[in-house]
Image (spheres, helix red, strand yellow):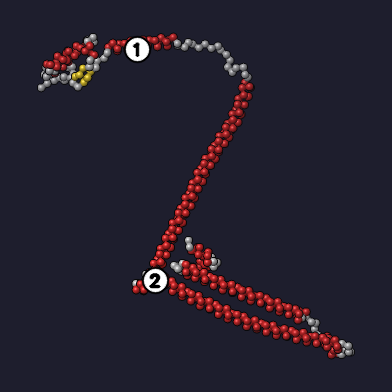
Amino acid sequence: MNPNKRGGSWTDPRRGGGGGGGGGQQHHTNNMQPGETENHLNNNQNLQNPQNPQAQQPTHSDGFTMVPPNESRRSKMQRIARTEEENYNRWKEEHRPGPINLAPETLGGGVSLAEVRQRQQMEVRQSKVEKKIRKEEMDRIRREEEEEKNQRMKAIQREKANKLEMKKLQEEQQRRELHQHDLQMIREQQQQRLQRSSSVPMAASNSTPASSWDRGREYREARRAEEQKELQLRKAEQRLKSEILEEKQKHEEEDRKRRMESERLRVNSAFLDRLEASGSGRASGSHPCTPEGGNIWKTEEPQDPASSPMPFTTQLHSIKKEEEEEEDEKRDVKVEEEDEEAECEWAVMKLQNDFPYYERDFLKGIVSQCNNNYKQAYDLLNV
């Protein structure tokens, strides 16, 4: 039920209702218990009396705390504020600026218009020159800054390139060291295998099945023997060919000598015949000339200087000398080729003994690239 029922209407206890403050106070007191009503009235009396020391104490009610203001301090602060405001207004009135009184005068001073125009033109020209100078100075500073920046960037890139080069060299050195270490390990393993295979007795090796290493070694030895036989056969074949060629050259040389001898005899006989004919003509010249004698001298043709025996013999000797030189050159070239081939075969055989896991054609190509130099080919393969 609503305790604030009045005249058949309902009212909110938090509002004052239709009456004044007394009605509100009455409604508020009606909502309280009998003990609470007395306490509330005492608190109101304490607040209304500022001289009471209990009026300065905070009050707690319904979960709220109310702190009453200090009236003496509040009144003092208000009095100080009013005094300061009055002082400020008084100072502002005292220091208010008065009216400005200037004597009238002609503007521009005592300088004529022509001088002013000349001064303006000079300032304009100087401003253009100064502007140009400032621009050049700014451009120079900008170029210097750009150049300095480029130099710094170049130095940084150069340092990076040097570091990269050093890193590459270190990696290459490490790779070589690892490669050398691996090669050393492989060689040591091969030596250990050879030592183990050589330490095993022959009977035990015959009784036990041959290992892959032994079979490979036997295969390489058999192949090396076959290649040695093939090389010997090739050498014998080359030797036979050279002997046949020498025999053929000897026969050709003998035939050429016989032809030259027959040609020389023919030329000599013709020369002697001409001498005899010329001698008989001079002997008959002391007797009276006969028609037959006159016909002989008239019908005799002049001797051709090119057909004389001396130039022909020198030409034959020069031809013979040239042919002999050509034969000697061919023989020397053939001997050099045979020597180079034998040297190449010998280098290939030695490389096969050192590197049995390479093919013969590959080793032969390496030797030919190294100009039949065994040491250079060995260094190239033993990397």
- The residue where tag 1 is placed is 81
Work out which quarter of the rendered image holds the N terminus and state it: top left
Q: Amino acid at mark 1?
A: Ala
User: Image check: 330 left or right of 266?
Assistant: left
- The residue where tag 2 is placed is 215
Instruction: Tell me what residue is drawn at x 85 percent, y 88 percent.
Output: 283
Residue 358, image x, y percentages: 45, 67
Residue 105, image x, y percentages: 57, 13
Instruction: Tell me what residue is drawn at x 48 percent, y 10 percent.
Output: 98
Instruction: Tell me what residue is drawn at x 52 percent, y 43 percent.
Output: 155
Q: Nearer the viewer, residue 144 or 174?
A: 174
User: Image check: 40 left or right of 193?
Assistant: left
Task: Using the image, determine if residue 152 lies above or below residue 341.
Answer: above
Q: Quadrant of residue 373?
A: bottom right
Callout 1: helix, strand or loop?
helix
Callout 2: helix, strand or loop?
helix
